Image (cartoon, helix red, strand yellow):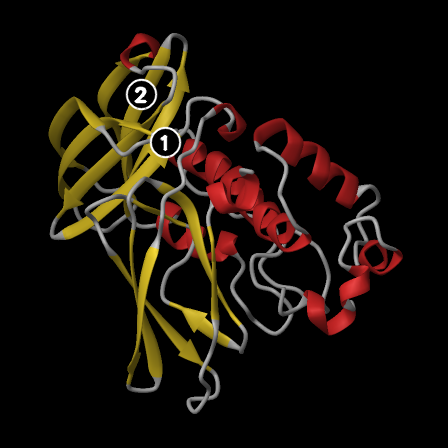
Amino acid sequence: MDVVRRFAAPEDFNIAAPVMEAHQKNAGGNARIAETMFRYFRFPRTFEDFVYLSQVQQGVAIKTAVSHWRSLKPYCMGALYWQLNDTWPVCSWASLDHGGGWKLLHHMARDFFAPVTVTVVPQPGGWRVMAVNDGRNSADLSLTVSALAMDGTRRPLGRATGAIGTLSAQPLLTLEASDLLPNEVIHIAWHADGVAGDDVFAPRPWKSFGLKAPMIRDDVSRRGDGWLIILDCDAPAFFVSLEADCTGRFSRNAFTLLPGAPQSILFTPKDGAATPRFTLRDLHSATMV
């Protein structure tokens, strides 16, 4: 929204407004974004939520492709996505906005392009859980897989360990479609050589899940030239995104927040003397009435 506000007045905050269409140079691009959004998500409540959700679906789309390609080693040994950055304030495929700001895709890419990661790959009748290592050394990995309900309840689905060779993809677990109840997603958590990671995989479009209000609580305090935001919640919050009313960078964005697992986010403003105001969005707040 900080980039949109540079070329559009509040009365233009509509995806079909002439100003918004003038800043979309892909023929039919805005209509395609809206149609795709309707296929996978409940429709956003406000224009600002639309801007947020368009970034979520961009990130999920690229993540889906890259994660799958990485799991195909040795048949596919790398992936690049189009495009990195923008030369003017525009709605586009870029993950870096005009001026260098990080869209949600850029935050998500840091995770799904991590040298060692775990991904869930659909297959007939269920899913394969794959470990991927693009590092220079073998990695000793331990994995926990759970079924995560919308109220935060977790059911164990399996555990695995393995030595993941360099430049390789290795299956660790197989899940059956019957392992999940209707309102559950797959939660994976892993440790590899001292580095922890986690992720959520939705087996169906997000619009089909009955999300609960996560009741996110925040504690904001000054930390040197930056601001520390500590978040916790009562129910799972998906694609949690923080925005600031001044230029700067968040240490993390577009993440899953789970009950009992607070997240600490650092915001570093470009102007160290700034006192930012923060806006928090998640999938429930953006799409649920």
Q: As drawn, is 20 to the left or to the right of 48?
A: right
Q: Name the residue under label 1.
A: 71
The amino acid type, in three-letter code, at marker 2 is Arg
Q: Quadrant of residue 94?
A: bottom right
Q: Which of marks 1 and 2 is nearer the N terminus?
A: 1
Q: Are marks 1 and 2 in contact (CB under 8 Å)?
A: yes
Query: Residue 214 location in percent, x, y?
Result: 36, 44
Query: Residue 40 location in percent, x, y?
Result: 58, 30
Q: In which quarter of the image is residue 163?
A: top left
Q: As drawn, is 128 to the left or to the right of 102?
A: left
Q: Name the residue under label 2.
A: 128
Disc 2 secondary structure class: strand
The C terminus lies in which quarter of the figure? Answer: top right
Q: As drawn, is 203 to the left or to the right of 158?
A: right
- Residue at (77% x, 53% y) in the render: 14
The amino acid type, in three-letter code, at marker 1 is Ser
Observer able to see residue 49:
yes
Query: Residue 89 location in percent, x, y?
Result: 72, 67
